[in-house]
Image (tube, rainbow, N blue to C red):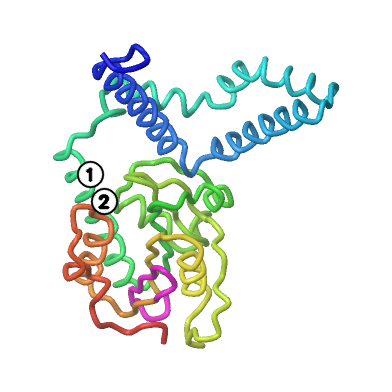
C-alpha cells in the first residue's frame, strides 16, 4: 500500500484504463480519417471552444445556445456519423476493429499491386491516358468529393474501364483508398513549378501538384507516348517499365519494407525532365 490509499495494482489498472481509452480513440480517428466526419468533428470542437469561452467571459445567451447544442449533440452525432458508426460496428463484429490478420493484409496488398500494375500495363500498350492517385497517410476526402463516388472493389478491369476514351469518367483522376476505388473523374491541384518539362501535359502537372500537398503516390499513363510515370513528394520519375512500377508500388505501399536500400524510389530514372 502506497501513500494516498493506492497500491501498485491500482496504478497498473489506471494505466491500463488510460491506454485502452487512447487506443480506442486512435482507432476511431483512423476510421474517420479522410472522410466528411473529420470536418464534422472539427465543428464539434469549435462548439465546445465557444462554450468554454462563453463561460469564461460570462456571455449568458451564447452559453445557453451552446449548452443546447451540446445537450442535443449526442443525437446529432448519431445521425451525422451514421456511416462511420455502422462501419465501426461491422468491423467490431468481424473482429477487425482491434486486430487484423497479417496474412489477409498481405493478400489484399498483393491483389492491389497486381491490379494496378496490370491495368497500367494494358493502358500503356494501347496509349490510353490515365491518372491514378493512391491515398496513403494524408486523407484525400476533399479531392474525392470533386469527382464521382465509386466505392467499388479495386480490380484491373474496373480501373481500366474507367479510363476508356469517350466514357463519362475517363477525364480526371481516380483516387484509390485501401483496396477500393473511392472516386473517379476527380480534380487535382496543378503544380506551378517552373522546372517541369514543357513536353509534359496536364496529367503530369496534376500528379506533381497532388504530390506536393499530400503523401499520395500517383501514377500517370501518357496517351501520347504510352509511357508510365510516377510521382511522390514533388518528384516525378518517368518511363517506368512494368517491373519498375511493380517494385515501386511494393516498396512504397508495403509497410513491412523498412530498409531504404529496398525502396524502389531510390532507383536511377528520369526525374522532372
Percent x, y for residue 148? 54, 47
Q: Distance between the Cα atoms at labels 2 and 1?
A: 6 Å
User: Contact (CB < 8 A) between labels 2 and 1?
Assistant: yes
Instruction: Name the one closer to the observer, 159 or 263.
Output: 263
Image quadrant assignment for residue 174: bottom left
The relative height of residue 125 versus residue 115 in the rendered view (above or below) is below
The relative height of residue 79 versus residue 217 in the rendered view (above or below) is above
The relative height of residue 107 versus residue 134 in the rendered view (above or below) is above
Q: Quadrant of the C terminus?
A: bottom left
Instruction: Name the one closer to the observer, 31 or 161.
Output: 31
Instruction: Name the one closer to the observer, 76 or 201.
Output: 76
Magenta residues span: 223-235
Residue sitting at x 53%, y 54%:
168
Residue sitting at x 29%, y 18%:
13
Percent x, y for residue 101? 18, 35
Q: How many marks?
A: 2
Report the residue marked by disc 1. 108
Amino acid at each position: 500500500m502506497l501513500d494516498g490509499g493506492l497500491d501498485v495494482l491500482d496504478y497498473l489498472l489506471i494505466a491500463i484504463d488510460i491506454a485502452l481509452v487512447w487506443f480506442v480513440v486512435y482507432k476511431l480517428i483512423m476510421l474517420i480519417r479522410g472522410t466528411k466526419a473529420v470536418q464534422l468533428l472539427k465543428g464539434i470542437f469549435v462548439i465546445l471552444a465557444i462554450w468554454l469561452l462563453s463561460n469564461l467571459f460570462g456571455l449568458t445567451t451564447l452559453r445557453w445556445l451552446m449548452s443546447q447544442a451540446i445537450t442535443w449533440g449526442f443525437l446529432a452525432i448519431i445521425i451525422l456519423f451514421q456511416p462511420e458508426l455502422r462501419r465501426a460496428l461491422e468491423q467490431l463484429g468481424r473482429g477487425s476493429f482491434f486486430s487484423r490478420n497479417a496474412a489477409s493484409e498481405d493478400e489484399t496488398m498483393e491483389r492491389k499491386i497486381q491490379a494496378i500494375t496490370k491495368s497500367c500495363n494494358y493502358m500503356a500498350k494501347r496509349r490510353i491516358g490515365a491518372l491514378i492517385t493512391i491515398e496513403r497517410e494524408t486523407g484525400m476526402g476533399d479531392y474525392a468529393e470533386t469527382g464521382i463516388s465509386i466505392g467499388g472493389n479495386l480490380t484491373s478491369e474496373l480501373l481500366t474501364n474507367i479510363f476508356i476514351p469517350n466514357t463519362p469518367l475517363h477525364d480526371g483522376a481516380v483516387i484509390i483508398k485501401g483496396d477500393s476505388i473511392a472516386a473517379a473523374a476527380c480534380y487535382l491541384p496543378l503544380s506551378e513549378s517552373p522546372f517541369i518539362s514543357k513536353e509534359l501535359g496536364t496529367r503530369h502537372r496534376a500528379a506533381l501538384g497532388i504530390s506536393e500537398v499530400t503523401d499520395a503516390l500517383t501514377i500517370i499513363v501518357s496517351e501520347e507516348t504510352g509511357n508510365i510515370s510516377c510521382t511522390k513528394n514533388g518528384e516525378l520519375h518517368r518511363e517506368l517499365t512494368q517491373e519498375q512500377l511493380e517494385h515501386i508500388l511494393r516498396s512504397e505501399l508495403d509497410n513491412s519494407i523498412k530498409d531504404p536500400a529496398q525502396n524502389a524510389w531510390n532507383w536511377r530514372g528520369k526525374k522532372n525532365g
